[in-house]
């Protein structure tokens, strides 16, 4: 990969991130990404949050459900606290330039770079040759999403680290190949914090995921208090009490995960949580965890229901978001077209 030192990009600081509209969001999506989307609105003037429906079709068509699922993710953004008057919320396919820039980047990215992507290997499994080309190309489209807005900061969970490195490599190679130093920024991933890697409630070595066949492995944003309590009570732990300090979490992935969730949800440090619960058993910790989770998620779920009940109002927000996204994306795409040397009348 390219290792030329990064040139100084002097454009505005801008946040971009996205989520796929597939089967409802879970606690990992919330703590790894969505909670950060909300917080970053206070630190950055320009935040752009996308629902990535072009990415969703890499996993197969779902034409009857796709638009409704896209609306639902947009509703979750708003319900969690993304303010559509301050931030831009829109659906990826509504801004055609994402696909156009992805094509240009297809001619910049190298096969070898994509062949190293672990997410493709995980998703394609043993049947890579039967996967869609789109699934293989997924991270190139992701780079286009970010760089179409010359975004400088990208809040994501830990599992997206490699894709973000690829975005930086594509930006750097484009700048080098087209002798356009600092044309694109090298986007910085914002991954830190205890929520960056939320694991399955049943297996602390596997990440919490929408695709796990068992619903008991995850907390969905729409789960009610009883369901949360039941899932947390049944979460895998061990017979020992909670440790007094972080170091005591080593080799106890399920415990580390539950303590991390508590810390992320209550906006406290892991050490602070262990100061309160260290030495206590799970009979005390699990109900306390379920309670903070339910208190956090109940208002979000209620707001999602309210928003989903009025698709026309949501569509008006998304149409406005798409207009504002295009207003940033189109001039940048026009610049890209000039840099690449495409014909212009
Ligand atoms: P998606 O929909 O798979 O995930 C959305 C976000 O949730 C985070 N996440 C997690 N974080 C912590 N623990 C978990 N168990 C967990 N599971 C998921 C993901 O890291 C992600 O931040 N490829 C992106 C979508 C995308 C994108 C982009 C992101 C498309 N274009 C441009 C940023 C910028 C994805 O993973 O979506």
Image (spheres, rainbow, N blue to C red):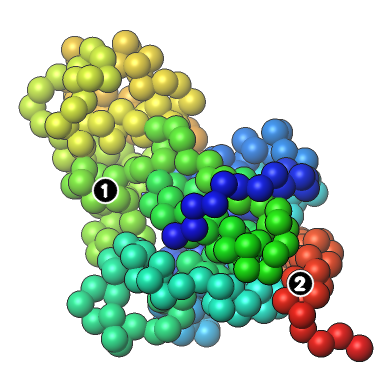
Quadrant housing residue 272? top left
Above or below, comparing residue 39 to residue 119 in the picture: above
Q: Quadrant of the C terminus?
A: bottom right
Of tags 2 and 1, which is closer to the observer?
2
SS for callout 2? helix
Q: Nearer the viewer, residue 148 or 269?
A: 148
Q: Nearer the viewer, residue 250 or 228?
A: 250
Residue identifier under label 2: 339
Position of 156 with respect to 115 (left or right) is: right
| Furthest-right residue in this view | 345
Above or below, comparing residue 2 to residue 301 in the picture: below
Position of 229 with respect to 33 (left or right) is: left
Which mark, residue 200?
1
Q: Look at the numbered discs 2 and 1 and tell me whether their residues touch, using CB distance below 8 Å.
A: no
Q: Is residue 162 visible?
A: yes
| Circle 2 Cα neighbour tier, 10 Å, few/some/many (<14 / 14–19 / ≥20) | some
Above or below, comparing residue 88 to residue 64 in the picture: above
């Amino acid at each position: 990969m390219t290792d030329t030192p990064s040139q100084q990009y002097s454009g505005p600081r801008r946040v971009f991130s996205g989520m796929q509209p597939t089967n409802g969001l879970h606690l990992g999506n919330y703590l790894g990404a969505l909670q950060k989307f909300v917080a970053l609105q206070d630190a950055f003037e320009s935040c752009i949050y996308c629902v990535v429906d072009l990415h969703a079709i890499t996993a197969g068509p779902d034409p009857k459900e796709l638009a409704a699922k896209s609306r639902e993710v947009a509703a979750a953004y708003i319900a969690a606290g993304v303010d559509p008057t301050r931030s831009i919320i829109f659906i990826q396919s509504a801004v055609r330039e994402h696909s156009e820039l992805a094509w240009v980047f297809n001619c910049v990215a190298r096969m070898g770079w994509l062949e190293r992507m672990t997410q493709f290997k995980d998703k394609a499994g043993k049947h890579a040759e039967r996967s869609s080309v789109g699934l293989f190309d997924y991270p190139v489209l992701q780079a286009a999403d970010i760089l179409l807005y010359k975004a400088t900061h990208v809040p994501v969970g830990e599992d997206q680290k490699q894709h973000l490195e690829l975005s930086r490599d594509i930006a750097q190679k484009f700048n080098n190949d087209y002798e356009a130093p600092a044309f694109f920024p090298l986007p910085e991933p914002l991954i830190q914090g205890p929520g960056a890697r939320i694991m399955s409630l049943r297996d602390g070595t596997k990440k919490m995921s929408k695709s796990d066949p068992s619903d008991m492995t995850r907390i969905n944003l729409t789960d009610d208090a009883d369901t949360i309590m039941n899932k947390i009570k049944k979460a895998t732990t061990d017979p020992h009490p909670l440790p007094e300090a972080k170091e005591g979490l080593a080799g106890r992935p399920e415990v580390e995960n539950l303590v991390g969730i508590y810390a992320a949800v209550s906006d406290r440090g892991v050490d602070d949580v262990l100061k309160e619960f260290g030495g206590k058993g799970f009979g005390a910790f699990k109900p306390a965890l379920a309670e903070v989770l339910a208190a956090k998620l109940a208002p979000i779920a209620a707001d999602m229901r309210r928003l989903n009940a009025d698709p026309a109002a949501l569509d008006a927000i998304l149409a406005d978001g798409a207009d504002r996204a295009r207003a940033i994306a189109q001039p940048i795409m026009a610049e890209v077209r000039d840099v690449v040397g495409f014909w212009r009348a």
